[in-house]
Amino acid sequence: MLDSGTSSNAYALSVSLNTPTNQPLRSGELARRAGVSADTVRFYERRGLLPAAPRSASDHRIFPQEALVRVQLIQSALSIGFSVNDLAGIFRERDRGAAPCRRVRALAAEKLAALEARLRDLQSWRRELRKTLAEWDRMLAKTPQGKQARLLDALAATHPKSRTRKTNFDLQLHRNRKREVQQ
């Protein structure tokens, strides 16, 4: 979990472990305890969200117990809109001893702004669709059974912006993808 204070430290979630807290975990066990797949653990490691794990004599990845907290933190952050690239950058800073807290907060604020813009767009679309359905109901009421009412033709004539609508959310996604590619 990301802490809500001004520091950028992870804090332990309440996790019941069957092994001592200092016992290292193989990647499969880490995945099972975190509720993710082993592929997800490998992906997080490749993308720099988890530090590279040393290998055992039998070539198994061995993670410290702290990796469980990190995976849970990653899952929490992803669930509120942080991207893997966002988190990789944040963890790089954090693991070097820096405090990316203001960056974390700024990213979250951007995600909230994009979400609020998306909600406004969705509400506008809902109003537009309700209006369109009401228009279509009137048209259908005047159209004899078996005859074409040409509903979509009427839509194109009365709602030309529907063809090229670009939402604030789409623009924000484009900016985020462009930024991720540049990193």
Image (cartoon, rainbow, N blue to C red):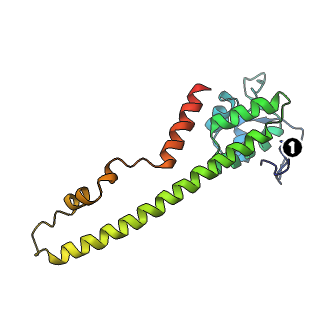
Residue 151: image location, x then y, percent:
21, 63
What's the residue at 41%, 61% (across, down)? 125
Can residue 35 be seen?
A: no
How many numbered dots are placed on residues in this image?
1
**Foreground: 14 or 47?**
47
State left or right for residue 144 relative to residue 10.
Answer: left
Q: Under tag 1, what secondary structure?
A: loop
**Foreground: 134 or 13?**
134
**Foreground: 37 or 103?**
103
What's the residue at 50%, 48% (across, down)? 168
Can residue 116 be seen?
A: yes
Residue 49: image location, x then y, percent:
71, 33
Residue 43: image location, x then y, percent:
63, 33
Task: Report the quarter where the C terminus lies.
Answer: top right
What's the residue at 29%, 53% (across, down)? 160
Three-letter amino acid code at disc 1?
Answer: Ser
Residue 148: image location, x then y, percent:
12, 66
Residue at mark 1: 7
